[in-house]
Amino acid sequence: MDDPRAEIEAVLRELRALMARPDNNFLWSPWEDAGPALKRIDRMIGRLERGGFPSRPTVAWLFRGAEAVQEVSLSSGWGDEFVALASRFDAAAEAFYNRGPWWRRLLG
């Protein structure tokens, strides 16, 4: 992977597009609708665009099993796409957060 930061951003953008689908079911998530979820993802994307990076646990929460995003994906019919995005995130996060200066590893 040439640019793990770019891959994390791409994964977040794809996740955002899935979460923004008008027919998503948020019944089993803590959100009533897509608004709060999209704001959370947008903050992470914005931070990456400004040259920063969200902490690994902050982003990883989106991709953990049995959490809010997975619940939306399963109840909305795009669970397989979610699993594929989570795999891509895991690979990019491993490359991004486990390399570089010592202080970056502390944030992972």
Image (spheres, helix red, strand yellow):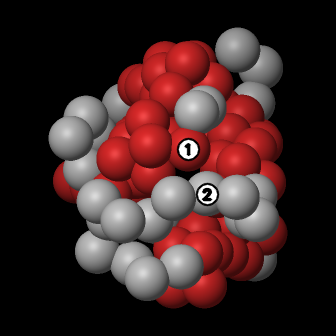
Answer yes or no: is residue 76 visible.
yes
Amino acid type of the residue that numbered disc 2 sits on in the rendered structure: Asn
Q: Is residue 91 above or below residue 15?
A: above
Q: Which mark is residue 97?
A: none
Disc 2 secondary structure class? loop
Relative horizontal placement of residue 40, taking residue 21 as reference (left or right): left
Residue visible at 44% across and 65% down in the picture = 26
Q: Residues within 10 Å of mark 2 (few under 14, many from 20)?
A: some
The residue beneath circle 1 is 76
Answer yes or no: is residue 9 visible.
no
Q: Quadrant of residue 81?
A: top right
Q: Is residue 54 above or below residue 104?
A: below
Q: Percent x, y for residue 25?
A: 51, 59
Q: Which mark is residue 24?
A: 2
Q: Percent x, y for residue 91?
A: 50, 19
Q: Are marks 1 and 2 in contact (CB under 8 Å)?
A: yes
Image quadrant containing the N terminus? top right
Q: Is residue 99 above or below residue 64?
A: above
